[in-house]
Image: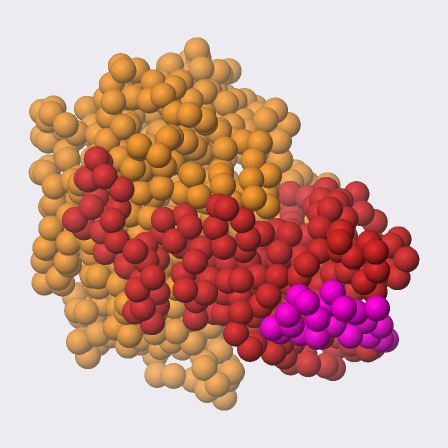
Chain colours: A orange, B red
Amino acid sequence: MANAKAKVDAVIVGMGWTGAILAKELTDAGLHVVVLERGADRDTQPDFAYPKVVDELEGSVHRRYLQSLAQETVTVRHNLTSTAVPYRQMGSFKPGTGVGGAGSHWSGCHFRALPEDFKLRSNVEQRYGASFIPSDMSIQDFPVSYEDLEPHFDHFEYVCGTSGKAGVISGVKQAGGNPFEGSRSREFPLGPNPNYLGAEMFYKGAREMGWDPYPIPASNASAPYVNPYSCQMGPCNACGFCSDYGCLNYSKASPNISILPVLRQRKNFELRTHAQVLKVNLDSDGKKATGVTYLDAQGREVEQQADLVLLCAFSLYNVHLMLLSGIGKPYDPQTGEGTIGRNYSYQNLNRVVLFFGKEVQANQFIGIGGAGTTMDNLNGNQLDNAKAGFVGGGIIWARQPGAGPVRGINVPPGTPNWGTAWKQAASDAFRHSFYFEVQGACMSYKQHYLSLDPTYKDGFGRPLLRMNFDWHDNEIKASQYLVGKALEMSKVLNPTAMAGDAKKSGEHYNITKYQSTHTCGGAIMGSDPKTSALNRYLQSWDVHNVFAIGANAFPQNNGYNPTGMVGALAYWSAKAIREQYLKNPGPLVQA
Amino acid sequence: MFDDDTSPARRDFLRKSLTLIPVVTLASAGLPSSTFAQTPASDAKQASTAVPATVPGDYKPTFFTPEEWAFLVAACDRLIPSDQVGPGAVELGVPEFLDRHMQTPYANGGIWYMQGPFLEAAPEFGYQGRLNLRETLRIGIKAIDAYSKKSFSGKAFAELSQAQQEDLLKSAESGKLVLDDISSKLFFTNLLNEVRNGYFADPSHGGNKNMGAWKMIGYPGMRADYMDWITVRDKPYPLPPVDLSGRRG
């Protein structure tokens, strides 16, 4: 290798949430850490500064804060017999790039999974019998419990200045919060954000339905805040540029404002941007990683040796790197053998739009990314799955990350797409409509997995990741059931028109429409090395000094946004590395 | 004209586009409609010919040819007409936006995955062809103009009556219009998206002059600070829009 850098203690791939958390924890432990980030360095100043950042054309059409698909993308197919084609234009999901990653352009919804979400398979079997689970559904229990992660959920919320209302503290129900949540050790660091109209009306509709609405936990600061790392946040000014955009106001938690201000001061921390990791290098017997090879900003191949290799890229690219590097055995859907790529899952997102007359000031241009109102009465153990007819639940919410006309104006069903009638409808709807969303869980299946594409290559000549995914009857039923409930609730509010997009029977996954960036699984955590890529500490079963940290570890996806869980798992993994692995490098769980 | 003329696809396209010989030299920006009415093409049926809306300012297209420009001015005027609801796309400078937008990396496929093979796939997989945005628009315009001339005794799209233009656009929107070289539906979808982008994007990009589209829908533009209005219910948001340069509408 012409360009070899001096060996370091740990090399981290990716400077998003998990990379920042691991870098913080491991530099705290005295390790010399190098982070390799494929994109540019970014910070509030100058990259997210007003007014440049709020240009809708640049942010939501040119996608300047997102990954360029020209360099890296995936291919997609609906079934095992068809030929996958590339995800050529940004649609269904939006991976980030650059320092902060998707953690800089997220909205801010910050949930914890429910205790029963961790034991999904055993919980469903116990409640409805094993035969209730379709034969091709490959859901698994997490190898950790809610109680294991509680301190880490808590810490990550305090790092993020999460604004919300606890529903249960030390086993005692709290008025105004989610009565069904797992018990918290304390209240949220900040109280809930104010309600815009849709969030307020959600309370009315949900209560009439007999549900228990509560404020969405949002990492959009409702008041001035200083986190445990002494990083400061300012109160959100509801600017309406959250999803797709970096925060102009130090209000939305991000690696950039919540952790990096500390890291950037540290001598044992080094951030290299425009550093595209090509593969993880293994020693001759493939049992240990020696480091990574990356392309630097000048296009030179550089080898960085390290004792620890932490994959902290976007979930899909963690799996991609494992497949490219020969870490673990690729999953084969025919035999069920192999683990890398197994149990890819997504999120079952649906939308209901409500239109009102001119007297109703919905003001969709106002936005607080993660804030709003939701309820858990159709999620977790609250839902009678046998009666509903599907596995997994979901939530309905009123959320308003901010709308602008370039991002699209919802118009009532039947409106033409152009001409005077469209102009009239768009003008009538823009300030007088809002939407509720249905965010359903997404189960994992034997036939839904990630692999290397046999044909298409990325900008560096490597095979693209191939996504094998489609909507299963179970998720279509869930969509219909949950959207039906959302429409029922919406009727209470007397809109002049409504539109819902429940999935139709036989409907296929459409990669052109934005749904959710919650791509999960593919390198999952588990208690059996035959059915999981990672052990309970997110350590590779096969290469003990590689940890793959992110939503790739979810055996299936629940009804919540993944970031709270991803952050908690990152702290959980970091703790195991600090307290166990560094003292005695090797497998933390015996296979 | 293209950033990269060396690829076979681009060379092929370039060669084809050079064969386009201007048959009607419509003057470009700022042409008064009275001048248009005096062209030889105007006869007794002239009353039914669409009167082209006037492009504001003195913008001269640098990407689109005069024929393409005439098409776009006419199409913009049909897609977002000037009417009692609010300003039209042409008077807000959307043709200027389109001409400038075509010269960005975005329109050149810079953030799209553009490698082959290019396979046919179900609509759920989106556009799988090899054309970037500017090629799509350019090829589509040429194809619709060719269709128009063939079907309407030599008249280009811009010379048709409003009703004829609308029919053609509807036929492209539904995909019923069969064109050589391109799917009419693909062309239409991209054109409409771009026209809307230009109509609603910040004026610095060339369209939405004086924030006319924002005023129409009541969008406060780039104010990006609504802390004092989140919970106000009983009156409409009172402030006019502000654009990226700080101007007030």
Horizontal side of residue A576 vs A541, given as left or right: left
Please report the residue visible at 74 percent of the width from the left and 72 percent of the height from the top: B26
Q: Which residues are magenta?
A: B19-40
Horizontal side of residue B119 vs A472, given as left or right: right
Assess whether residue A418 is covered by the magenta stretch: no
Seen from the viewer's position, the closer of residues A418 and B225 is: A418
Q: Quadrant of the N terminus of chain B?
A: bottom right
Please report the residue visible at 62 percent of the width from the left and 35 percent of the height from the top: A508
As drawn, B120 above or below A215: below
As drawn, A409 above or below A71: above
As drawn, B128 above or below A210: below
Q: Position of residue A122 (x, y in %)?
A: 38, 23
Please report the residue visible at 83 percent of the width from the left and 56 percent of the height from the top: B44
Q: Position of residue B27 (x, y in %)?
A: 70, 75
Q: Position of residue A293 (x, y in %)?
A: 47, 74
Residue reaching furthest to the top: A387
Seen from the viewer's position, the closer of residues A192 and A568 is: A192
Please report the residue visible at 54 percent of the width from the left and 49 percent of the height from the top: B83
Residue reaching furthest to the bottom: A2
Q: Residue A282, can we see it?
A: no
Q: Quadrant of the C terminus of chain B?
A: bottom left
Q: Main secondary structure of the magenta part?
A: loop
Q: Position of residue B63 (x, y in %)?
A: 65, 76
Horizontal side of residue A1 vs B129, given as left or right: left
Seen from the viewer's position, the closer of residues B194 and A358 is: A358
